[in-house]
Amino acid sequence: MAESSRPTRLALTGELALAVALVLFAGITAAVIGSAFAGPATPLALQVVLAQGLIILAGLYSLLRWRAIPWSAIGLVRPQLRDLPRGLTVLLVVFLCNGVFAGLVMLLSPGALEQHHARLTDVAGFLVGGLPLAAIAALMLFVALYEELLARGFLLHRSRLLLAGIWPPVMLSSLLFGLGHGYQGWIGIAQTALVGIVLARATLHWNTLWPAIIAHAALNTVALGLLLGA
């Protein structure tokens, strides 16, 4: 069932605000759950990430049902074999963009990148320290799934109705995606927004979320593996 009429700009803005609020609520609730049930028996990542992901998926399901938007409209279509090489291509583009970004940061703000990496290492060790790489990869696939459904799915879909053209919606949805990673500092926000731009453009080009999901999961897995020396 598709939407019966095109929503107003005010309604679209409200939906974007609801999606952002959903991310904040999921993050806070997951942190509370993780703190309440923290223990050596269960890695913190399994509690926090699973709780956050399930809350976001439940909230997203409610938003889609409310607006009568099918999952296929936000890019969740049947996966195909060609999505794998597409995802790896997107991953290479992300690596290139990150390399250029890191070079600019090192040039303009010496020392800032090292502080950023130290912060990420602390976060990575706190969340997934002790987990084998295979478990981290599986967890990051789940993270990529719910983050892409929200960011390159719902946010991008509604941004395209709110703003004309290709790049304005790509930039808006990527900025919101970047702000959702504010705990990483300004470098993390900018870097995540840059990754979001690449993933959003790829999603619009192929009309499917799967290449972005694959690239996102691989990027997180490689990054955590390098940070933790796995």
Image: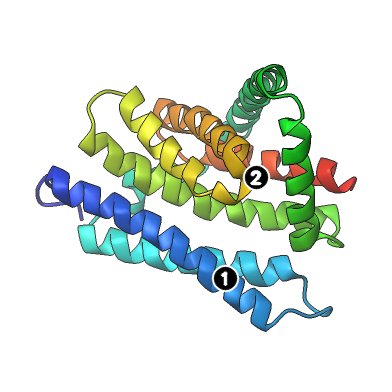
Tag 1 near tag 2, CB within 8 Å: no
Residue 138, given in percent of the width and then of the height, sits at: 71, 56
For badge 2, the amino acid type reads Ala
Viewed as shown, does residue 70 lie left or right of 89? left
Look at the numbered disc 1 and give the secondary structure of its residue: helix
Distance, label 1 to label 2, CA atoms, is 20 Å
The quadrant in which residue 185 appears is top right
Above/below status of 202 relative to 127: above
Q: Quadrant of the N terminus?
A: bottom left
Number of numbered discs on residues: 2
Mark 2 is surrounded, within 10 Å at the Cα level, by few (under 14), some (14 to 19) or many (20 or more) other residues, namely many
Q: Which residue lies most toward the bottom here?
A: 36
Along the horizontal axis of the image, is 7 left or right of 24? Answer: left
Residue for badge 1: 30
Q: Secondary structure beneath disc 2? A: helix
Q: Residue at x 68, y 24 (%)?
A: 109
Question: Extreme right residue here?
Answer: 229
Q: Is residue 173 visible?
A: yes
Percent of width and height locating residue 157: 31, 41
Query: Relative to residue 35, is residue 187 depicted above or below?
Result: above
**In the picture, residue 22 is in which quadrant?**
bottom left
| Amino acid identity at mark 1 | Ala
Mark 1 burial class by Cα count in 10 Å: few <14, some 14-19, many 20+: many
Q: According to the image, label 2 marks what residue?
A: 217
Task: Give the image quarter of residue 68.
Answer: bottom left
